[in-house]
Amino acid sequence: MIDSDRLGVHRAPAPSGGQLQRPSGRPDSEALAVVQRTASVVADRPVALAEAFYQHLFQLAPGVRSMFPADMTAQNDKLCRALFQCVRALSSNDREATDMEIALRRLGAQHANRYAVLPEHYPYVGHALARAVRDLSQDWSTTCTSSWIWIYTWMSEHMLAGSER
């Protein structure tokens, strides 16, 4: 369970008691197609996506704001670049997806060691991401939400695996 007091959360915990649904394995082609379609819409507005993402994240878990720089310009770019690289890797071939999984494990270790990111932060990030994409997409549905959460769960599972080393 998420320790909302320690995170400085002033709202109810993330849905499902703070836990993301955990589909097993890589997202299937149907979920990936939905994500690719909505990603192509938001990719034209990466700054708006990043700003919406961080606005939602800091609303859900205000205590994590101190983990980020005052000037979020570089952070916004890193977020969008990493997100779209993951979607591209999943859309490519098995080798690129496997390489991305390895990179995500390294990124998870870095986030844990350098930035003190904890496992309980991850559900907030996933929900903030889905909400940010929803805000910018004109074509949103529960299928879109589920597909983005699946992509994020795939990413976070590998990052968490790296952070546990």
Image: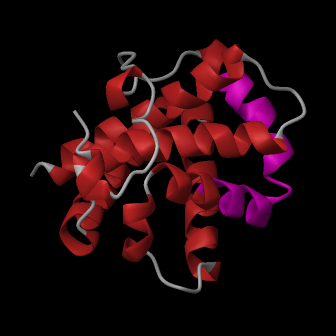
| Residue at horizontal 86 percent and vertical 56 percent from the top | 44
Answer with left or right where residue 150 lies relative to residue 130. left
Residue 147 is drawn in which quadrant?
A: top right
Answer with left or right where residue 27 lies relative to residue 76. left
Answer with left or right where residue 122 lies relative to residue 42. left
Instruction: Find residue 159 and report its horizontal and vertical position in percent.
Output: 31, 47
Which residue is farthest left?
165
Specify whether residue 45 is painted magenta.
Answer: yes
Q: Is the magenta stretch mostly helix, strand or loop?
A: helix
What is the basis of the colouring in this image? secondary structure
Q: Can the viewer see residue 97 in this picture?
A: yes
Instruction: Find residue 122 and report its horizontal and vertical position in percent.
Output: 36, 45
Q: 15 or 152, which is in the foreground?
A: 15
Residue 13 is drawn in which quadrant?
A: top left
Q: Can the viewer see residue 89 in this picture?
A: no
Range shown magenta:
32-53
Q: In this view, does 137 lie above or below 60?
A: above
Instruction: Find residue 66 and report its horizontal and vertical position in percent.
Output: 39, 75
| Residue at horizontal 44 percent and vertical 75 percent from the top | 68
Which residue is farthest right?
138
| Residue at horizontal 54 percent and vertical 54 percent from the top | 59
Q: Is residue 68 above or below residue 133?
A: below
Q: In this view, does 124 lie above or below 8?
A: above
Instruction: Find residue 141 and report its horizontal and vertical position in percent.
Output: 76, 18
Specify whether residue 159 is painted magenta.
Answer: no
Quarter of the N terminus within the rendering: top left
| Residue at horizontal 80 percent and vertical 31 percent from the top | 37
Residue 67 is drawn in which quadrant?
A: bottom left
